[in-house]
Amino acid sequence: MKTTFDPTPDGTRWQAFLEREVTTVWVTTVDHDALNVPHDPDSLKALQAAIETRALELLAAGQATVVGESRPPIALAGWEQIGLGRDREALEYQTGRFQDEDNSPDGIVTVDLGTDHRARDTVAALDDDAYDRLAEAVTAVRGMRHRAAALHHIRGILAEDTPGQTAIGVLFSTGNARVGAEGTVLFTDGTIDDFDFGDDVQEALSTLYGGQGETFTVAVDLRDDSFNESNVHLANVYKRLNAEHLIPNPNTESPAPGKPST
């Protein structure tokens, strides 16, 4: 990816932000008898944590003395164009280079992404092969971003609602012709439960898969972050997440949420 810069307009003024991180060293005395930490012959972590906690308490109480301070040079933290609220990115545009499989110079094209107008013009000028390769790359990256967003929200909701439990994955099925926000979660102890993962997950999955038939399901495996789509009617969450070893009777259907299979 090559970056080039447009000329700076006449009369431009810049607002610069400067910063310096100052490091201060304090010293205080911590009485071991006040720590009440049992002796551990194998680790000093508990003792270290207790010393740190007590030292911070003494610092807050004003019972610590400054013995040193480090003041590195002041550095530029950021800069922006006054009046436009735009930083230096406003003066640059990026060009992407796409090369054919045989790496020949004739296979290299440049796409100007500086403005919507320039992007449209340069994409329209691509030949069919370059256009198809660019479209496939954009589609793949868009899919990666939507999957990452879905995983982020799924993990956040499970961490908040089921602390201490480890989920193997989630099975989403079709609702109203689209993959919905409700999913069945399988945990490592063999229990399952239904969750509403909200609009963010529904939006990501709907963008990825659009309208589908009533037998469509998506198994999101949290062990390897994979998405396994299927149009074959198989609602058994254990089988869809390759966790049949958790089913005492492999011939049974999925049990009611919150209970192990019997």
Image (spheres, rainbow, N blue to C red):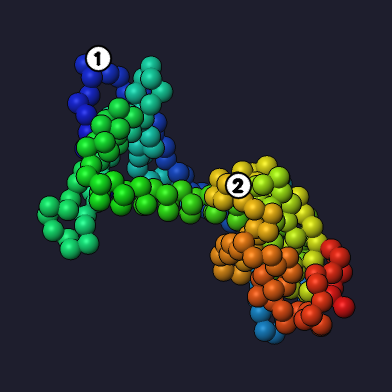
Q: Which amino acid, mark 1?
A: Gly
Percent x, y for residue 92? 27, 33
Of marks 2 and 1, which one's residue comes earlier in the chain?
1
Q: Secondary structure at mark 1?
A: loop
Percent x, y for residue 189? 78, 74
- Give the residue displayed 74% in from the left and 52% down from the top: 182
Q: Which amino acid, mark 2?
A: Gly
Q: Is residue 63 visible?
A: no
Q: Is residue 62 left or right of residue 133?
A: right
Residue holding disc 2? 211
Q: Is residue 238 visible?
A: yes
Q: How many marks?
A: 2
- Give the residue displayed 54% in from the left and 54% down from the top: 148
Q: Quadrant of residue 164?
A: bottom right
- Name the disc covering residue 11, or none: 1
- Give the residue displayed 86% in from the left and 65% down from the top: 256
Percent x, y for residue 67? 52, 52
Q: Quick one: label 1, few (<14), some, or many (20+) residues within 10 Å?
A: few
Q: Is residue 96 left or right of residue 256?
A: left
Work out which quarter of the rendered image holds the C terminus and state it. Answer: bottom right
Q: Quick one: label 2, few (<14), some, or many (20+) residues within 10 Å?
A: some
Percent x, y for residue 66? 55, 49
